[in-house]
Image (tube, coloured by chain):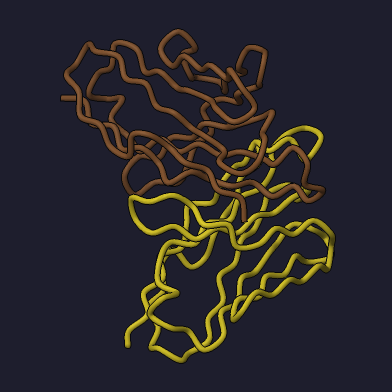
């Protein structure tokens, strides 16, 4: 199956700082990537859709100015949590779809655990 | 909005036993995904179902989508400790059905005792 990587795997930062998380499709191209958030013992919630070469679309209730998304190439999307606060502490997971596969499979990265002190 | 209900929420079985996890949707399912997650890790893609009545198998795991496309089941035959984890069903919630915007069930925690 296709491989999606995320970096870093975990990050601890002070309140008020910004944190950038990278999502890469390693062996395929993805025009669309998705960012999810998962709180402890809860399921994944879609935050936004990242589109290569255009603006991201955000789900209701997700602040676009706080969670900046950039999809600069067909293999890389970044999520920047700006002015992070303790309530932003969560597990962030990205997913991507293979542009050239006929089946609509969606592959997830290993996730990034963000802890804001 | 689409909601997915998984049952049971948790399951403890003895190694070698068969088990079934169900996923029920409030709306018609256009794309139903099954994933496995170890706590604190990413999701491992298991299977995707699209057509009513469709059934797919991989090793000892079989997933089915009912004819009405509102319920899916995941069946594990002769379970092993390696099957332990959190099983999530996800459905494409985009208006056209295949936009990749997934809504997930709450997950089923599977424990397999050796």
Q: Which residue is drawn at 57% across and 23% down?
A: A59
Q: Which residue is drawn at 78% across and 66% down?
A: B66
Q: Residue at x 60, y 59 (%)?
A: B34
Locate the C terminus of chain B by quadrant.
Answer: bottom left
Give the side of residue B55 with respect to residue A75, left or right.
right
Residue B6, x across and y down, in percent = 54, 60
Give the side of residue A10 with respect to residue B86, left or right.
left
Judge whether B63 appears above or below B113 on screen: above
Residue A91, x across and y down, in percent = 35, 38
Q: In which quarter of the image is residue B100?
A: top right
Residue A22, x across and y down, in percent = 44, 28
Residue A105, x across and y down, in percent = 69, 50
Give the side of residue B30 with respect to residue B80, left or right.
right
Judge whether B110 appears above or below A29 on screen: below
Instruction: Please count the marks in the image.
Output: 0
Which residue appears farthest toward the front when viewing the image? Answer: A27
Locate the N terminus of chain B by quadrant.
Answer: top right
Give the side of residue A4 with respect to residue A101, left or right.
left
Judge whether A16 appears above or below B107 on screen: above
Colour chain A appears in? brown
Camera-side residue of B69 and B86: B86
Judge whether B105 appears above or below A66 on screen: below
Q: Residue at x 61, y 79 (%)?
A: B59
Camera-side residue of B92 and A51: A51
Which residue appears farthest toward the bottom when viewing the image? Answer: B16
Colour chain B appears in? yellow
Which residue appears farthest toward the top when viewing the image? Answer: A65
């Amino acid at each position: 199956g296709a491989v999606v990587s995320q970096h870093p795997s975990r990050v601890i930062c002070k309140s008020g700082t910004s944190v950038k998380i990278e999502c890469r499709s390693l062996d395929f191209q993805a025009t669309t990537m998705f960012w999810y958030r998962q709180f402890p013992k809860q399921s994944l919630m879609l935050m936004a859709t990242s589109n290569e070469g255009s603006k991201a679309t955000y789900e209701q209730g997700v602040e676009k100015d706080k969670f900046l998304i950039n999809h600069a190439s067909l293999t890389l999307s970044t999520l920047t949590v700006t002015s992070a606060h303790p309530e932003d502490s969560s597990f962030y997971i990205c997913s991507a779809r293979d542009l050239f596969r006929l089946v609509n499979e969606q592959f997830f990265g290993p996730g990034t655990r963000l802890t804001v002190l | 909005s689409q909601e997915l209900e998984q049952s049971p929420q948790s399951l403890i079985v003895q190694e070698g036993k068969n088990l079934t996890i169900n996923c029920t949707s409030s709306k018609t399912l256009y794309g139903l995904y099954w994933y496995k997650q170890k706590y604190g890790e990413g999701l491992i893609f298991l299977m995707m179902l699209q057509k009513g009545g469709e059934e797919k198998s991989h090793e000892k795991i079989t997933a089915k989508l009912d004819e009405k496309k509102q319920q899916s089941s995941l069946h594990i035959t002769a379970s092993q400790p390696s099957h332990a984890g959190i099983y999530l069903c996800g459905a494409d919630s985009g208006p056209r059905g295949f936009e990749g915007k997934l809504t997930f069930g709450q997950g089923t925690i599977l424990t397999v005792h050796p």
